[in-house]
Image: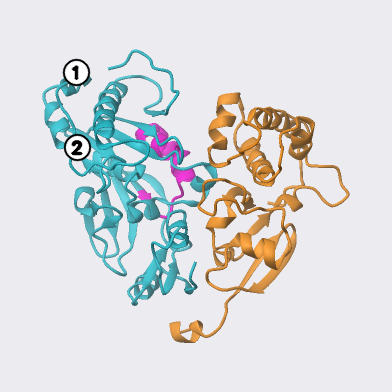
Chain colours: A orange, B cyan
Amino acid sequence: MTPNAERKQTPDVSMIVNGRAVRTAVDGRTLLVDLLRERLGLTGTHVGCETTQCGACVVHVDGKAMKSCTMLALQCEGATVTTIEGLSATGAPLHPMQAAFREHHALQCGYCTSGMVMMAVDIATRVNDLDEPTIREELKGNICRCTGYHNIVAAIAAGARAMRNQPSESDHA
Amino acid sequence: MRDFVYHRANSVEEAGRLASEDGAMLLAGGQTLLRDMKLGLHFPASLVDIGGVVPRHIELRENLISIGTGATHAEVAHSPVLHRHLPALAALVGHIGDPAVRHRGTLGGAVAANEPAGDYPAACLALDATLHTTKREVASVEFFVGDRRTTLEPGEIVTSATFPLARRAAYVKFLNPAARYAMVGVFAAVVTDGSPRVAVTGARMDGACRWYDAENALASSFVPERLGDVRLSTERLAEDFFADAEYRAHLAGVLARRAVALTDRAGPSVLVLSHGSSITAAP
């Protein structure tokens, strides 16, 4: 296709979101987070800083935590995306990391929480020995302005232990 | 962000052709470019996505480490080849941005962006890296030429970087307290032929550069004491809310001495400091 011909139509993108095949036309500039929130109604993923610092928009793309405000939807062609809504099925028990956040009161206003939980699941999956300094270092890209982080760090340690004891199949990636 | 035409390149050649068009820019992981587009620093007419077509190998080839520019920071940070042969580079890359950024950002994007506080440019300069493009091979000192500027031409794509195995190497950075990038970072190395290299990032408005006065001082003996009288000129140093030029110049000296000392120690070859870091006895 010549560049001129392409310029006149809106390209399609296909991906799997929370286990469901999605195919939709998007503008070049449509961000993954905009596709998730506005097209698919998955508003659990939040937009905070919009400049890749705060982590409110973290989702899993092909099993890895990424900032959905700093990815084009078109860059996710063929990808498998999991959002906070996909961590556990509707009506099913919470994912162990979600349960740990609730148990440890790891949130106040909740705005950063879905990004925190998605990052936490990624951390627990990647890193074996999760001591407190490691958790804090790994959370460098997730900002919370309420809690002071103590309960979040405690929840991630507990959630990681729970994930190891109960291998989860809930993460579609 | 203004709209643009998106092209998914099917080959490096096609990407080069599309990126030669007026107003076109190359898109790798997008961790710098997409943010800068939102901030209004770029208004490309088209983006050429090279995510699927640039190489991403990490290999030892005849005393050189070759890294495909599509390799993500996470892949470089966890590479067994690098951990064995050039651990300072793996550790430096393991401290770029945050884990989510490292899953997406790439070597190629980082060197092409040449952000003034970028970690990769300092490593490339201090390790005498060569950048291999679709048109030529270029030494790092010829490639990084100013704030967010390189000698890349339109349609030219960096496909790999080669790093000679250094005899010694270490990197120390002090973080901006808010954004957590390097307020100043210093990479110190002894390269293959035994000569010293010192590269500074974050300090100068023009981005990362070699610090030749420090290298000359270390020529006879690669020990931190040699840097006692060396001072980074405050000319064209960055100034902001957190640090003026004097502060950055002083910090560069402190970090350079620490980096040189760190090259001689067992254990991690990268040290990340910030406000509140414990002060231990160090050069």
Q: Which residue appears farthest toward the front when viewing the image? A: B241
Whole-percent x and y of residue B150? Answer: 26, 57
Whole-percent x and y of residue A96? Answer: 77, 37
Disc ID at residue B243:
none
Span colored in magenta: B67-95
Whole-percent x and y of residue B241? Answer: 37, 40
Residue B195 seen anywhere in this rendered image of the structure: no
Residue that carries the numbered disc 2 in the rendered image: B234
Q: Which of marks 2 and 1 is in front?
A: 2
Mark 2 is on which residue type? Thr
Given residues A49 and A41, the one toward you in this image is A49
**Other-residue count near label 1 (Cα within 10 Å), few / some / many at <14 / 14–19 / ≥20:** some
Given residues B282 and A150, the one toward you in this image is A150
- In the image, residue B192 sits, relative to residue B32, either above or below, namely above
> Are tags 2 and 1 found on a single chain?
yes
Which quadrant holds residue B279? top left
Disc 2 on helix, strand or loop?
loop
Which quadrant holds residue B158? bottom left
Q: Is residue B212 left or right of residue B124?
A: left
At 44% from the left and 64% from the top, the residue drawn is: B50
Disc 1 on helix, strand or loop?
helix
Residue that carries the numbered disc 1 in the rendered image: B225
Whole-percent x and y of residue A137? Answer: 53, 32
Mark 1 is on which residue type? Glu
**Other-residue count near label 2 (Cα within 10 Å), few / some / many at <14 / 14–19 / ≥20:** some
